[in-house]
């Protein structure tokens, strides 16, 4: 049986996953709610809220694989944005140094 | 001259699918010798296009991430493929297709640009003299090995460094080879297409430097180190299965001149640590 990914205990490069702010943000001005990203992402980062104005939301940000941007590649209206990779790398390095 | 055949996904329920039909028709208008493949016919009659697919360069046009056209072609014996993915092209040309199920004037413009771009690229590829493919000698590599269900995983014991995104770097003096691990190739299943960077491209650590596509997924090699690309493994374009069959040796993807390996190494794992990390990840998934 597959165990559920537990973002409370997960780490990335020796840093608590919850200390790394890497996940997509949805630009609702551009998003056309085609839900391709939700269908595509195997990590359940997104969730459909059919009856709400924002029909797509980020529900599990820490399930997102750090540095993965695959969902943004399939987003035709270019509505998914990610943090700056260099800043996140620097943050990971700092956290690792703090933990040493 | 190579024959060209076009396989659009023709998805009628999405604008992204409609645009693939428009591109196919535009290509036919620009060059009458181009053959069109109907995905519906192909799905019920594999004999119909068998020779055409074997003898032509097939332009596969997918509208969305379901990638119906790619999946249909995967069942055929093909020799040369060029892949077009509409969301990527739409972003490249900064033309949005809109929400309505019609092809707008902007959509027609996008279709025309993509069609012209395809023909231009094919023309340039024909002119280009390909670098000879040199087999690399990796010598004898010792591997850690483990099997889970039907999957078999290896990790080189020495000489390679790994990221938690399942990519490797093998430093060789001032240069290094980069590739993907057994975990990533097993996870993605049979790799069908590989998009390699240009020689001279500047790479930063964790950049998506090689994109590849399997029946299951769209994936990237995230560069474990930064540097300037000095060679690419052109063989992968014809034999992408090398990434599945021999990911640590003949399935290498790019060579680069290392920019800052001493510092970047801090965020990498050696073979022993990556093997332990990979096993833990697999066990959590089972």
Image (cartoon, helix red, strand yellow):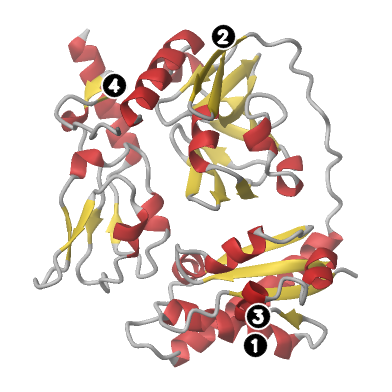
Q: Name the residue carrying label 4.
A: A93
Quadrant (top left, top right, bottom left, bottom right) of the C terminus of chain B = top left
Q: Residue at x 42, y 57 (%)?
A: A73
Total marks placed: 4
Work out whether residue B44 or residue B95 is closer to the camera in this orientation and state it. B44
Mark 3 and mark 1: span between their CA atoms?
17 Å
Front disc: 3 or 1: 3
Query: Are labels 4 and 2 assigned to the same chain?
Result: no
Front disc: 4 or 3: 3
Mark 3 vs 2, N-terminal side: 3
Q: Name the residue carrying label 3.
A: B41
Q: Is residue B156 visible?
A: yes
Give how far across and how far down residue B25 sits, in percent.
Answer: 65, 88
Mark 3 vs 1, N-terminal side: 1
Mark 4 and mark 3: span between their CA atoms?
54 Å
Q: Residue at x 22, y 54 (%)?
A: A46
Q: Secondary structure at mark 1?
A: helix
Q: Name the residue carrying label 2.
A: B157
Front disc: 4 or 2: 2
Give how far across and how far down residue B254 sits, in percent.
Answer: 64, 34
Q: Secondary structure at mark 3?
A: helix
Q: Name the residue carrying label 1.
A: B25
Q: Residue at x 69, y 36 (%)?
A: B242
């Amino acid at each position: 049986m597959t165990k559920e990914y537990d973002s409370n205990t997960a780490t990335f490069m020796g840093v608590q996953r919850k200390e790394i702010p890497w996940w997509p943000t949805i630009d609702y001005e551009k998003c056309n709610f085609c839900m391709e990203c939700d269908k595509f992402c195997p990590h359940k980062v997104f969730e459909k809220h059919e009856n709400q104005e924002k029909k797509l939301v980020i529900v599990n940000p820490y399930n997102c694989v750090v540095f993965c941007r695959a969902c943004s590649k399939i987003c035709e209206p270019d509505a998914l944005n990610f943090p700056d990779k260099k800043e996140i790398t620097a943050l990971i390095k700092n956290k690792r140094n703090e933990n040493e | 001259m190579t024959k060209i055949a076009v396989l659009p996904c023709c998805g009628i329920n999405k604008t992204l699918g409609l645009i693939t039909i428009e591109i196919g028709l535009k290509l036919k208008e620009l060059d009458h010798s181009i053959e069109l493949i109907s995905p519906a016919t192909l799905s019920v009659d594999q004999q119909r296009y068998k020779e055409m697919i074997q003898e032509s360069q097939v332009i596969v046009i997918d509208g969305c991430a379901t990638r119906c056209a790619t999946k249909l072609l995967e069942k055929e014996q093909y020799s040369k493929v060029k892949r077009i993915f509409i969301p990527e092209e739409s972003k490249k040309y900064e033309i949005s297709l809109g929400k309505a199920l019609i092809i707008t004037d902007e959509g027609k413009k996008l279709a025309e640009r993509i069609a012209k771009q395809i023909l231009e690229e094919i023309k340039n590829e024909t002119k280009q003299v390909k670098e000879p493919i040199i087999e690399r000698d990796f010598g004898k590599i010792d591997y850690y090995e483990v099997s889970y269900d039907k999957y078999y995983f290896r990790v080189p014991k020495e000489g390679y460094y790994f990221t938690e995104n399942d990519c490797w770097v093998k430093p060789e003096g001032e240069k290094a080879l980069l590739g993907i691990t057994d975990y990533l190739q097993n996870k993605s299943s049979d790799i069908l297409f590989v998009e390699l960077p240009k020689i001279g491209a500047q790479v930063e650590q964790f950049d998506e430097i090689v994109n590849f596509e399997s029946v299951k997924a769209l994936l990237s090699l995230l560069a474990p180190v930064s540097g300037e690309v000095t060679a690419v493994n052109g063989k992968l374009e014809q034999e992408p299965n090398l990434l599945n069959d021999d990911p640590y040796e003949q399935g290498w993807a790019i060579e680069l001149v290392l920019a800052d390996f001493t510092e970047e190494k801090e965020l990498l794992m050696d073979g022993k640590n990556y093997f332990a990390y990979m096993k833990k990840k697999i066990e959590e998934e089972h």
